[in-house]
Amino acid sequence: MHASAVTEAAARDRVAAVLDTFGELGDGLAHVPIPPSVPEEGAAGASERIATALRDLGLRPRVQTVPFESRHVRPGGTLWTSLQPGIVLEPGAPVEVWVASEPRSPGDQVEFRVMHGPGPAASSRIDLVVDPVVRLRVGERIRIATGYMAQLLGPTTLGTLDAEVPTGVLRPSPVGPDEPDVRLAWVAERPGRIEVPLTVVVDGTTYAVRTLTVVVGS
């Protein structure tokens, strides 16, 4: 009985701690939902609908479209928004939304991850559309792993990912057999800032994917 009472008291304490993190919205505040994407709507329709919904809430939307398509995001889907949980906005405040538009080439259909540091830290390809900057320290290793081309090209059609990287700041690093998805890897050699243009070759044709900016600190 004693052990049961202690367990019950501990459970009540945990529930109370969770409930303490919730609170009521103050006067004049309201929850602003992210308008969900609608299948087959397309980028133009989604952009207008989202902008209208945010204007109706008294906000000032800035909706941008970015050519991109993947298993997770279709044209018309939301890639990124400045509306983050807990943010309080004044009436008329600007709100940014990035919407995926129809891809222009296979390069806009490559989903990849950029991993760096001593652990499995990773930034998704979608994050890099918004902020294509990777920050490293000297000695850290950066790895670029592909997911797959969009379904219309087939889930096993990866193409050949490549990049022309100036020497000095990054040094090429071998890819080990325990890294099956990694296509490219470098080690940060010295402080500096360089542009890494990623390309993919599909059926003998080279397409631009995206240019990453790598900033190496000491």
Image: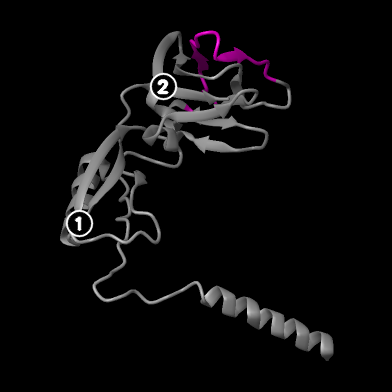
Q: Is residue 213 left or right of residue 103?
A: right
Q: Is residue 109 left or right of residue 179?
A: left
Which residue shows up at 63% across the image and 26% down it?
A: 140
The majority secondary structure of the magenta stretch comes to: loop
Query: Residue 74, located in which quarter of the rendered image?
Result: top left
Query: Residue 206, located in which quarter of the rendered image?
Result: top left
Relative to the observer, which residue lies in front, 212 or 76? 212
Q: Position of residue 75 (x, y in %)?
A: 32, 39
Per the rendered image, the range of residues in magenta is 154-175
Q: Earlier in the sequence, mark 2 or mark 1?
A: 1
Query: Residue 181, located in which quarter of the rendered image?
Result: top right
**Viewer-side label of 2, 1:** 1
Give the secondary structure at mark 1. Answer: loop
Quadrant housing the C terminus? top right
Give the secondary structure at mark 2. Answer: strand
Relative to the observer, which residue lies in front, 180 or 62? 62
The answer to whether any part of residue 191 appears in the image is yes
Question: Amino acid type of disc 1?
Answer: Leu
Judging by the rendered image, the residue that carries numbered circle 1 is 59
Q: Residue furthest front?
A: 218
Q: Position of residue 151 (x, y in %)?
A: 45, 32
The answer to whether any part of residue 111 appears in the image is no
Q: Residue furthest bottom?
A: 1
Q: Is residue 198 left or right of residue 67?
A: right
Quadrant housing the N terminus? bottom right
Disc 2 to disc 1: CB gap under 8 Å? no
Q: How many numbered markers are drawn?
A: 2
Magenta span has 100?
A: no
Q: Position of residue 71 (x, y in %)?
A: 46, 39
Judging by the rendered image, the residue that carries numbered circle 2 is 209
Q: Mark number for residue 75?
A: none
